[in-house]
Amino acid sequence: MEGRDYRKQMGLKGMKELLAEEDGMGTVEIILIIVVLVGLVLIFKEQLTAIVESIFGKITKQTNKF
């Protein structure tokens, strides 16, 4: 019986340590930021495309002047 109680205590201790561990939090945060950025790109795709085309059009015009 002692072995069983010891394993149970170690299991609970291991769970507490696992829940307290914060090494994976950076990864989760980065994934959430990427998901938000991808969502924003999908929502504003047309506007972003128009802005980029406008900027490249201006760059092309200005480089042709020289």
Image (cartoon, rainbow, N blue to C red):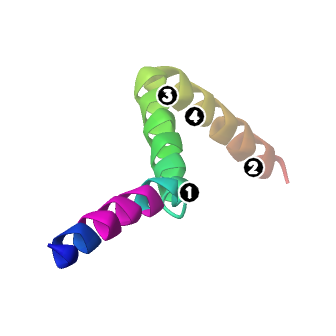
Q: Alpha-carbon distance for marks 4 and 1?
A: 35 Å
Q: Quadrant of the C terminus?
A: bottom right
Q: Is residue 55 left or right of residue 47?
A: right
Tell us which disc is closer to us: 3 or 1.
1
Q: Earlier in the sequence, mark 3 or mark 4?
A: 3
**Residue drawn at the location 23% of the way across and 67% of the way down:** 5
Dominant secondary structure of the residues highlighted in magenta in the image = helix
**Residue drawn at the location 40% of the way across and 63% of the way down:** 13
For disc 1, the marked residue is: 26
Q: Alpha-carbon distance for marks 4 and 2?
A: 16 Å
Q: Which residues are magenta?
A: 8-17
> Which element type, helix, strand or loop, lies under badge 2?
helix
Instruction: Specify the farthest residue to the front.
Output: 1
> Which element type, helix, strand or loop, lies under badge 3?
helix
For disc 2, the marked residue is: 64
Q: Alpha-carbon distance for marks 3 and 4?
A: 18 Å
Q: Amino acid at mark 3?
A: Leu
Q: Amino acid at mark 2?
A: Asn
Q: Is residue 66 left or right of residue 3?
A: right
Q: Alpha-carbon distance for marks 3 and 2?
A: 34 Å
Asked if the magenta segment contains residue 11, the reply would be yes
